[in-house]
Amino acid sequence: MGLSVSASFAILAVAFFIGVAPLIESVFYASNRLMEGANDVADWKMAWARTNIQVDNATYNGTLTLLNLTNIGSTVLTVDGVSVLLNGTYVPHNATNATVEGKATDIWSPNEKLRLELNVTSALDERVVVVTGNGVAKYGVIA
């Protein structure tokens, strides 16, 4: 009797560990994915907190709406990530000519000026909203 109880306990113990091993692995995998997600959110919040732009001026010269912006934050931004709304209407990127410090580039570093030439008509006192790729927005009025 002693050997059969010990043998059956050993078989049940081995079966238990074999059955629980995938469960433990899935718990570790899920916890690792949650930590990666939390780190991604923390990185995004840090970039958002370090992003700041300034609308230097917004003008309409009869054919083009001109926006002059300055990256006054400490985050390097992309020009493709910048979106413009003119009186609540999205201005597509193909209607925009963008230069950073006079050069056609996609990198907008801190303390650099971005000039956007929008091929859209506008009127005086229209509101313009510029939104960066990570969600920071600034408002301006066309003068």
Image (cartoon, rainbow, N blue to C red):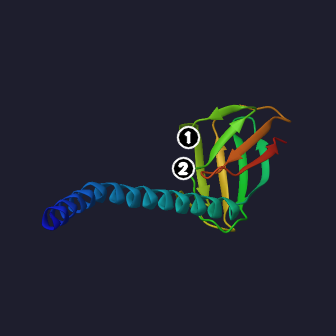
The image shows residue 26, relative to residue 62, as above or below, that is: below
The image shows residue 48, relative to residue 62, as above or below, that is: below
Residue on which the image places disc 2: 80
Q: Specify the quadrant that holds the C terminus.
A: top right
Q: What residue lies at 64% left-to-right and 34% top-to-bottom?
A: 90
Q: Quadrant of residue 51?
A: bottom right
Q: Position of residue 32 (x, y in %)?
A: 43, 61
Q: Position of residue 39 (x, y in %)?
A: 54, 63
> For this rendering, which residue is in front, 84 or 14?
14
> Mark 1: which amino acid?
His
Q: CA distance from mark 1 to mark 2?
A: 8 Å
Q: What residue lies at 59% left-to-right and 65% top-to-bottom?
A: 76
> For this rendering, which residue is in front, 109 or 15?
15
Q: Dot 2, crowdedness within 10 Å: few (<14), some or many (≥20)?
A: some
Q: Could you say whether the residue bearing mark 2 is in a helix, strand or loop?
A: loop
Q: What residue lies at 60% left-to-right and 55% top-to-bottom?
A: 99
Whether residue 139 is visible, yes or no, is yes
> Mark 2: which amino acid?
Asp
Q: Specify the quadrant that holds the N terminus.
A: bottom left
Q: Position of residue 100 (x, y in %)?
A: 61, 60
Looking at this view, name the residue that lies furthest to the front: 1
> Is the Cβ of the residue at disc 1 closer than 8 Å to that at disc 2?
yes
In the rendered structure, find residue 93 and report the number of the disc placed on it: 1
> For this rendering, which residue is in front, 68 or 23?
23
